[in-house]
Image: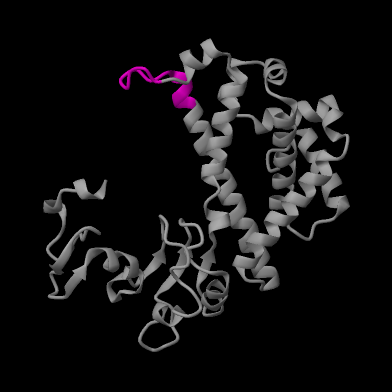
């Protein structure tokens, strides 16, 4: 916890105020009656002006249309931050996001920035479903922190790789669409998500999964290599419920296609995408 941080490491002008502290004087002479209130409002403090703002943790609705003026510099127009990446869910309300983007802030909302947790938990569940009890005990359980299973370490790297790849694709897709259309990024996040979900629904209702060749190509690309190196694809398919592998199949195709071709892509683009996917072209 931050309460265990060694304050001797802080520079002369720096400070650490815990939420439990009261009546604290900062190095610049400013008096802080409540550490809790100071924490809650610090994003509006003059010392928090920065190029990039990454709010993390809770406190939904911290920046709203009613207090957005506090997010501006003394000139009453320029934002305190150039870039905002929401690491906290709902920290900024949608109407406040619109104001910030209109004033030139590059903003990526929570729904785009916070997908890593969902990816991580989903792949953890996948490992639990694919491995037998004995295999899971051997490869995924850490009984000695100085002797972590090699599979576990490599699987973690696989998950990190997937998260980083998806984050970059989401960023580039939204950035490209914003430059081409001028639509605010906070709206494009929702549009991209809806487009991916709609395409996934279409894929799930089709017979695409029944095509063995397509199924194998897609799942080999979508599944973590550490898992497929330990277990054959055939073994994974025999152990993991079909509705789960179908979900992986549809999500991989729909997300990769939309990230590559954009939200205004058409049926011909999808045909071209699937051909390239089957041919194993690396840029897909």
Relative image position of residue 81 (x, y in whole percent): 41, 72
Q: Would you say 252 lies left or right of 79 here?
A: right
Residue ID at (73%, 38%): 281
Residue ID at (68%, 15%): 235
Relative image position of residue 3 (x, y in whole percent): 21, 49
Q: Would you say 122 lies left or right of 252 here?
A: left
Q: Toward which corner of the image does residue 71 lie, by quadrant?
A: bottom left
Residue 211, placed above or below residue 269? above
Farthest residue, direction bottom:
75
**Do we see residue 261 in this rendering?**
no
Give the overall secondary structure of the magenta segment. loop
Asked if residue 219 is among those painted magenta in the image, a careful observer would answer no
Asked if residue 151 is among those painted magenta in the image, a careful observer would answer yes
Residue 166, placed above or below residue 278? below
Relative image position of residue 256 (x, y in whole percent): 70, 45
Residue ID at (75%, 32%): 246
Q: Would you say 69 lies left or right of 282 here?
A: left
Stretch of the chain drawn in magenta: 142-154
Relative image position of residue 181 (x, y in whole percent): 70, 71
């Amino acid at each position: 916890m931050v309460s265990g941080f060694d304050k001797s490491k802080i520079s002369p002008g720096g400070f650490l105020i815990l939420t439990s502290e009261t009546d604290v004087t900062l190095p610049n002479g400013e008096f802080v009656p409540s550490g809790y209130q100071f924490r809650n409002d610090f994003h509006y403090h003059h010392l928090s002006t920065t190029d990039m703002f990454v709010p993390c943790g809770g406190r939904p609705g911290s920046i709203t249309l009613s207090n957005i003026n506090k997010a501006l510099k003394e000139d009453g127009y320029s934002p305190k931050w150039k870039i905002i990446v929401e690491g906290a869910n709902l920290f900024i309300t949608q109407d406040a996001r619109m104001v910030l983007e209109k004033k030139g802030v590059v903003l990526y909302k929570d729904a785009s920035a916070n997908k890593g947790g969902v990816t991580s938990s989903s792949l953890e569940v996948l490992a639990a479903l694919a491995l037998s009890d004995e295999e899971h005990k051997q490869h995924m359980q850490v009984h000695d922190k100085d002797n972590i299973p090699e599979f576990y370490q490599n699987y973690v790297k696989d998950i990190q790789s997937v998260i980083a790849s998806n984050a970059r694709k989401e960023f580039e897709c939204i950035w490209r669409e914003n430059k081409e259309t001028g639509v605010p990024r906070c709206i494009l996040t929702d549009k991209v998500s809806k487009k991916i979900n709609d395409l996934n629904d279409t894929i799930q209702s089709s017979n695409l999964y029944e095509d063995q060749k397509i199924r194998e190509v897609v799942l080999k690309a979508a599944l973590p290599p550490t898992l497929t190196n330990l277990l054959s694809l055939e073994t994974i398919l025999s152990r993991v419920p079909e509705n789960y592998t179908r979900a992986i199949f549809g999500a991989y195709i729909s997300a990769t296609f939309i990230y590559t071709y954009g939200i205004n892509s058409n049926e011909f683009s999808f045909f071209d995408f699937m051909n390239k996917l089957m041919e194993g072209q690396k840029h897909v």
